[in-house]
Amino acid sequence: MKYKELVNVYEALSQTTKKLEKAMILADFFRDIDSKNIGKVVLMSLGLVYPKNSEEEQGIGDKTLMKAISQTYGVPISKVEDRVRELGDIGQVTENLYKEKTQQTFFSKELTVEFVFNSIRKIANISGSKSQPRKIAIISELLSSASELEAKYIPKTILEELRLGVGEAIVRDAISNAFEIDKEVTERAYALTNDIGLVAEFAKEKGEKGLKELNLVPGRPVKPMLAQLSPGVDISVKTMGNVICETKYDGIRIQIHKKGDEIKFFTRRLENVTQAIPEMMEPVKNGLPDENFIVEGEIIATRDGKPISFQNILQRVRRKYNIDKAIKNVPLTLYLFDVLYYKTSLIDKPLKERRKILEQILKPGNKVNLSDKIDVNMDNIDEAKKLFEDSIAKGHEGIMIKDPNEPYIPGLRGKKMLKFKAEPETLDVVVIGGTYGLGRRSKFVGSYLVALKGEDDELKSVVHVATGLDDETLEQLTKLMEKYKKYDKGTKIFVEPKIILEIAYSEIVKSPEYEAGYSLRFPVVKRIRNDKGIDDINTVESLKSMFKG
Ligand code: ATP
């Protein structure tokens, strides 16, 4: 299949802002693609060559890419950098350079989707000391064969920055539409596998029935089921009738998979962190059976029996070096609260049965425990309140209120699992820019421009936040800003949307100044949310409804 066909679709997608139209354009396109290419094309319509959360990463630095562009078009790298700063879009820069080129060594062979896809994968797999020239050679080969429009989209795909307003939801709808599959079936298949290319292949080859057969496989992480906010314990228990209440531990969510002899730990974002927490391996092996399983729980760090800051755990879990020291300084405890697989998939069973199985298969120990849990209804509602108070007194976050009859629905933030916390609700936002400080703080980015997700997944700025940052966090954030820098202007810096912050605020206000149309009064950074990604940030829509509420 010619790459040109895909690029024409990219162009058509860029001509409309309407989600429905985008989904229709993609559906029409997907329908006629052969089985060999459908998986690749679907991934590439999201600007990816590896499924999200795959252990393989596409990534290549801006610098290497700019160097490749400068070499391909025979212009100095400073010119490429200036243009990127000016236009803010590397695809447009490449397209312009293509138009301006004089020597004609270009367009030597027609690019195919397969060739572009495999080449970008190849770049990702190159490592080692002499890797940069090899990566540059591959990019140059692609660009040298590209037409003007292809040259625009190749760098965008390499950087995972198509900016076509096409998110997973649109692609899922397009797959449903193209192959006449119920939307919920596509959604479930995706949440179970996290591989949109695989879902598309199954949809094309086996239809709805085949897609329904896709199921959990130990070793392949599953999107976690999420919670909504409870408006109050009484009202939630009254609505649900019988509930399970559990302590809400303030740590990080961990999904543990056992397949054969191998045990893997994944975070909420489905990142494999097995290497970073070696001390949990033995307790999990000893506490859980030999058969294949998937269990879920929260890991917290404690000192003298009290939980310590969430930030500490994240640093622990993401650590690659000095692990021994961290094991001693930041001891971890795991509280399990669900089982998704034991010998077979359990997600369609009600929570009360899954919990029973978990209780049967776990031998609790020092490091691996069951979450505190009680059964509550309106007759003993005081016990729920007591659990809440105890949980706060012990330094945890509050309680979870769960419907015991509910199956596990991967990826769903539904009404059957609620959280009730002591602290007011916060927002998860992504940093898109910042400003360096003055005087003593001129080395640090002191103020952060943050955004929420708007319609079509476009980012909309919402506020500048500059408080809540101690020196250590400021230094850490500044390093991240420099790592993800797209360009700077004077003291301002603009970055890839990679850093997620959780912020508290006193009030939501209307604001023409920010793209979201709303802003926040007295925003304060609570923490960096390394365990969340761009898909997890709040939306302008949710802010709007909170404002109205
Ligand atoms: P928050 O920022 O409030 O932690 P979140 O967006 O990370 O929320 P939610 O699904 O909204 O995630 O809240 C539930 C989270 O609470 C779970 O993802 C899990 O990490 C954590 N948690 C702690 N204790 C429990 C428990 N007993 N049962 C389920 N989840 C728990």
Image: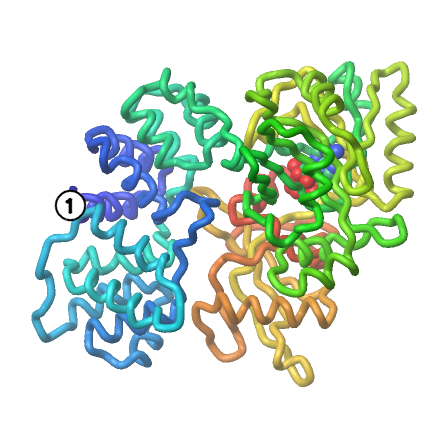
Amino acid type indicated by mark 1:
Lys
Query: Can see residue 475?
Result: yes
Residue 2: x percent and y percent?
Answer: 15, 45
Q: In which quarter of the image is residue 530?
A: bottom right
- Give the residue at x 58% y 17%: 348
Q: Residues within 10 Å of mark 1 (few under 14, many from 20)?
A: few
Q: In which quarter of the image is residue 135?
A: bottom left
- Give the residue at x 49% y 31%: 191
- The one nearer the camera, 411 or 177, is 411
Q: In which quarter of the image is residue 34?
A: top left
Residue 327: x percent and y percent?
Answer: 74, 57
- The one nearer the camera, 188 or 281, is 281
Q: In this view, does 452 lie to the left or right of 90?
A: right
Does 325 appear above or below 232? below
Residue 90: x percent and y percent?
Answer: 32, 64
Report the number of discs. 1
Q: In this view, does 157 lie to the left or right of 193?
A: left
Q: In this view, does 472 lie to the left or right of 452?
A: right
Which corner quadrant holds the C terminus?
Answer: top right
Q: Tell me the quadrant of ligand 1.
A: top right
Which corner quadrant holds the N terminus?
Answer: top left
Query: Can see residue 549?
Result: no
Q: Is mark 1 on a helix, strand or loop?
A: loop
- The one nearer the camera, 395 or 284, is 284
- Whether the residue carrying mark 1 lies under 8 Å from ligand 1 is answered with no
Residue 469: x percent and y percent?
Answer: 71, 66
Colour setup of the view: rainbow
- Give the residue at x 67% y 58%: 315
Residue annotated with mark 1:
2
- Give the residue at x 38% y 72%: 63
